[in-house]
Image (cartoon, rainbow, N blue to C red):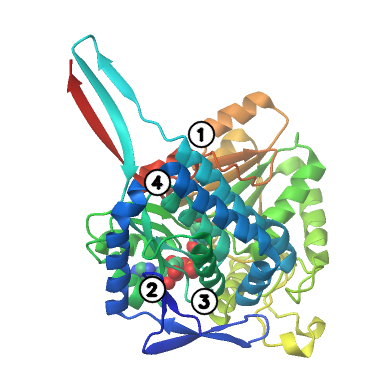
Amino acid sequence: MIKNLINGKWVESKETFQTFNPATGEVLAEVAHASDEQVAEAVQAAKDAFPAWAAMPVAKRSKIIEKLGDLIAENVEEIARLETADTGLPLYQTLNALVPRSSNNFYFFADKAKQMNGHTYPVDDQMLNYTLYQPTGVCALISPWNVPFMTGTWKTAPALALGNTVVMKQSELSPLTTDFLGRLSIEAGVPPGVFNIVHGFGATTGNAIITNDDVDAISFTGGTSTGKHIIANAGLKKFSMELGGKSPVMIFEDCDYERAMDAAVFGIFSINGERCTAGSRIFVQKGIYDKFATEFAERASKIRVGDPTDLNTQVGSLISQQHFDKVTGYIRIGMEEGATLIAGGPDKPVDELPDHLKGGHFVRPTVFRDVTNDMRIAREEIFGPVAVLIPFEDEADVVAMANDNEYGLASYLWTQDVGKVHRIAQKVDAGMMFVNSQNVRDLRTPFGGKKASGTGREGGDYSFEVFCEPKNVCISM
Ligand code: NAD
């Protein structure tokens, strides 16, 4: 039984739900479904624990946070296997990238907390203003299922290191590694009430969290419609909203072709394509479009789909039947819209799957060419292994198409022309741009998006925006 963690104690609930292995259909665990009262208890525990945690000397608090990083590093394999079982993500990615990176979140923010500083604004010899950054208070951290451990730790580490207390709700589809994090937090010496976990569905447990007046801030990662709902219903709180994406990849004829090809393949098919920053709209300049499309489809067809625990597997099982239906539904929409299917398709690769995986939610890496920017497959977030290839003429053409979309999370640019890089970097509506580069995360930089991709940034000093309150102190001299 996966229990809630409230005020340092593991607590069952009257109601439970199950979490499944999406690749096999196996029930992995019965999970406590936190009631409204239990959410209120968790928030109260966080509120009560806040003053002492916030007042703890930063060196002592940072030691606890570092210890949490160490414990993750010591348990990478177990966490990665749990994550893969709960989400269907390929083990080679959870084991080699997503879980190891999570311990860095704790090391980074343990260090960052020690370097906290403010600003000073002297006014001649009359006045002195200085700014204190103080912890925000009780922070609700709400995560989606796609990379749950990575996202959960990305929020937990700065929130705790900067002196806040936490009520965390992981997606109901992927609670296992958050439960593991709860156990590690106790082992690391996080005091009772500082880090609380409640499990449950968005409309029940999630709703009880966001509407609680004692929650000071909500750091949310998930779908755009959920984010809008939270902002409309949570009342006066601080928000950090990391929402959906439909990120453009702009590949010019003058690019380093092989590197661009590798990155474009990885950018849409890694993490099963269930990735907020996936390069899901691939714009290719006309002179290389045909060659690129043919070779991209060949690469996609060779991707190994199957058992997520096999270290050779590159695309595992999507998270649920419902999500499988959504992704394959979009593949059918693309075919109806007149795009040309050149790899994959909506049918499950059942012939290639062993019996125990036949009920899994596997989708072949799928590629469409002859896509226009007004098609639904080019406009809407599919959140699966489906690439759309759109030809473009020139710089102005591709920038206009890249910006003609409701989302604005990441963007990717492939060209050797430095002037073009700087011009396009200024013009593209996105929170992040990666030039001649895969999505490489540097924890010091701002992560987040604009338009329907969210508000606020997290990472480095930018995490202070949600997890700290600046207080100005004005002194007359
Ligand atoms: P979702 O919005 O359905 O759920 C996310 C979380 O919110 C879950 O824990 C869910 O239980 C909770 N929730 C749902 N309704 C709620 C409510 N009314 N009140 C409070 N909590 C509620 O999203 P999902 O399907 O789990 O995740 C996929 C989405 O997440 C995609 O759109 C993807 O782009 C986005 N995402 C964004 C980023 C980013 O950094 N921008 C990263 C990963 C995923």
Query: For the residues marked 3 and 2, what is the alpha-carbon distance in whole angstroms?
Result: 11 Å
Residue drawn at x 52%, y 38% is 428
Tell me if mark 4 has few (under 14), some (14-19) or many (20+) residues whose alpha carbon lies within 10 angstroms of its own.
many
> Answer yes or no: do the residues labelled 1 and 4 have beta carbons within 8 Å?
no
Q: Residue furthest left?
A: 476
Q: Which residue is denoted by mark 4 in the rendering?
A: 456
Secondary structure of the residue carrying tag 3 is loop
Q: Which residue is denoted by mark 2 in the rendering?
A: 202
Q: Which residue is denoted by mark 3 in the rendering?
A: 173
Residue drawn at x 40%, y 77% is 201
Residue drawn at x 45%, y 41% is 113
Q: Which-is-in-front pick, marks 1 and 3?
A: 3
Q: Is 52 or 312 nearer to us in this picture? A: 52
Does the beta carbon at disc 3 come under 8 Å from ligand 1? yes
Residue drawn at x 61%, y 60% is 71
Can you tell which mark lies on residue 427? 1
Q: In which quarter of the image is ligand 1?
A: bottom left
Query: For the residues marked 1 and 2, what is the alpha-carbon distance in whole angstroms?
Result: 36 Å
Q: Is residue 250 above or below residue 219?
A: above
